[in-house]
Amino acid sequence: MKAFQVKAPHDYQVADIETPTANAGEVLVRVAFAGICGSDMHIIHGDNAFVRFPRITGHEFAGVVESLGDDVEGVAVGDRVCVDPVISCGECYPCRIGRPNVCGSLEVIGVHRDGGFEELVAVPAANVHRLPDHIGLDAAALVEPYTIAANVLDRMQPHPGDRLMILGAGVIGMTILQMALAKGIKDVIVTDVINERLAAAKELGATHVFNSLEHDVEKEVLALTQGEGVPLIADAACVPALLPQMLRLASAAGRIGLLGFSVQPSDLVQLEVIKKELTLVGSRLNNRKFPEVLGLMASGQLDPLALVSHRLPLSDMPSAIDMLDHRPEEVRKVLIQIST
């Protein structure tokens, strides 16, 4: 069967590999669609500290159950499913307190074990979620990015009437925007350096957008908030150098959600944190958010296909990577169609 395999940083190809089988407790999924994520690009470029090579990447995918391993219940051959990539031990301290997404033995499908850029993939049965009839497999491949958004918003604990600022209008920024609106946050500021992305954010419901290369964002946001600052700030740009600005723009008692995996240090001015009693939270992956996201998709409160700019076959993965690397202004989400 065909699979997109990263052998080492910058060394990747669509290759023929052996077809996997489902072990006990697993199901074999025939992948229909898989989305290319920024973290897949980090793996390709050697910037992911967690990956084990060689690796078939892809943690955003949906498909149809092809076969079952032994001791599998609650799933049937032919079920349409999406897959939560988070695999946890259930026994360590984070798992015991209900935070399995930061399990001490965490494994992520597509990072620590092979993922969805292949025709058939074996995954734990506990990680598959059956789809409502009216959610297509293409939309279902994008459930996972919305769980990232749901997780960071929960970590920031919004209050009624809170304003949210999102740094970065890429796919994760747009999922945070849609999720925030679905959760009742009515005032959302979005910043980016690409006007095409800001226009898309406006279309999706952002109340204010600013190009940080063309505007003094601090001046504009402080004027907009009458000097109070913003209660909720989500860093979907994942640029460590922006942390001081976030500290200055946060309101007293504000919460800042950080999503990036950069190893570069950030300048943290302790005075800003203490005088405002700010809360800085990290958010990694998702903490059992798939049912919540599927419910919001089923009710029409999320529009995943609005994020999709390109649909390509698996054989075009190299050209998709080139486009993401060199023409990001042309791209929102790239969906790879692997089977029909």
Image: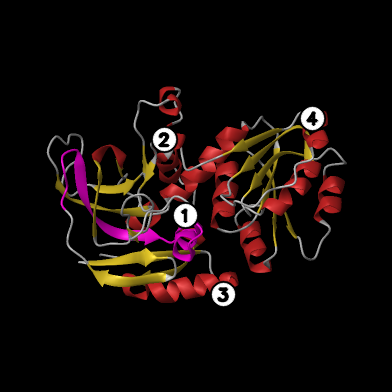
Depth check: 210 or 184 in front?
Answer: 210
Given this view, does label 4 or label 3 mark the residue nearer the observer?
4
Local SS, label 4: helix
Q: Is residue 162 magenta?
A: no
How far, Cα to Cα, is label 4 from label 2? 32 Å
Give percent across and percent down for residue 179.
Answer: 55, 44
Q: Earlier in the sequence, mark 1 or mark 3?
A: 1
Q: Which of marks 4 and 1 is nearer the N terminus?
A: 4
The quarter in which the C terminus is drawn is bottom left
Q: Residue 327 carries which label?
A: 3
Q: Which of marks 3 and 2 is nearer the N terminus?
A: 2
* Residue at the image point whose x is 20% and y is 35% from the top: 74
Give percent across and percent down for residue 302.
Answer: 49, 48
* Residue at the image point whose x is 68% and y is 51% from the top: 240
The amino acid type, in three-letter code, at marker 1 is Pro
Give percent across and percent down for residue 132.
Answer: 32, 44
Magenta region: which residues? 21-48
The quarter in which the N terminus is drawn is bottom left
* Residue at the image point whose x is 32% and y is 57% from the top: 116
The amino acid type, in three-letter code, at marker 2 is Arg
Q: Residue 288 carries which label?
A: 2
Residue that label 1 marks: 304
Q: Which mark is residue 198?
A: none
Position of 106 with respect to 302 (left or right) is left
